[in-house]
Amino acid sequence: MRFILLIQQLFLLVIAAQIHNQIAPRGFKFVGKKKGAVGGCEAEDVAIILKELEIAQEAAEFAAEHFTEYPYFRAFQAPEHPFFKGKKLERAAKQLFTRTAKILDGFHKDDKFRIECRSMLCLVAGGDSAALVWERRKSSRFGPNVPVMAFCRDFFETPQDATAFASTEGRLRQFREVLDKNPKDIDTGSTIVNMRSVGNMRSQIILHELTHTSYVAKPVIELLNRKAETELK
């Protein structure tokens, strides 16, 4: 039942995103096509990305306020583990999603967050990546740390099956069709309504990748220091 409520909340967030008449870049720097360079964002790519950024921002804001009300927080983060005893895990997690929403609203230090499409980073990551974030952890002689989010070919592909990467709006329409047909007894093993399908929505891919930036991850990294990484292995 809680899973159905979560899906319904996500569905409402999509509707809220749709009422915006115009979507502006909000400070993101898209890298266009350059002669002799791999990839580059076309106008259609930018439109797809901006729509998903908008939805991801709404989801991050909702998560910052409500995600501990759902069973997944305790199921995946194991707050009852002895290491977490006395630690402010919920506060750190809320800060993580709050920071995620700030980036998705166009905020980032020095306003230099860069977005690439089908770039060399995708080739380095491998053929099955939908998107990835890259940043240097320290400034170097190559210049200051400028985070890059690269959207790869699979991010833009039309899904060939029910569990493939898909637009958030399209996937939620599929969820709604299943829920309307069978609202009381959802068998997640035999329908598309499951966490894998949620995780493969474009907006959720963006949320996941942004947690790899040092800015977003800082609250949790400070909570779970290197000693924690050793103890939890």
Image: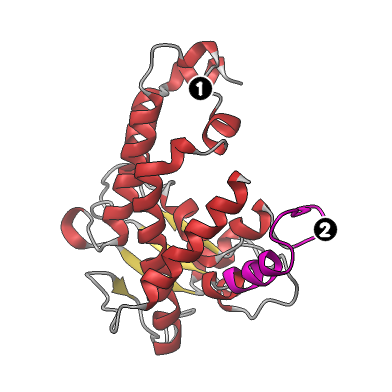
Label 2, secondary structure: give it. loop
Reading the image, the residue beneath label 1 is 79
Q: Which residues are magenta?
A: 172-191
The answer to whether residue 108 is seen in the rendering is yes
Exactly how many numbered labels are in the figure? Answer: 2
| Rendered position, 62 above or below 124 | above
Work out how far the residue at label 2 is from the one at label 1, CA to CA, in angstroms: 31 Å
Q: Amino acid at mark 2?
A: Ser
Q: Is residue 127 left or right of residue 121?
A: right
Q: Is residue 177 magenta?
A: yes
The answer to whether residue 35 is seen in the rendering is no
Q: Indicate which label's residue lies in the foreground, 2 or 1.
A: 2
Find residue 124 and report its horizontal and vertical position in percent.
Answer: 57, 61
Reading the image, the residue beneath label 2 is 190
Quadrant in the rendering for residue 18: bottom left
Label 1, secondary structure: give it. loop
Give the residue displayed 27% in from the left and 69% down from the top. Answer: 28
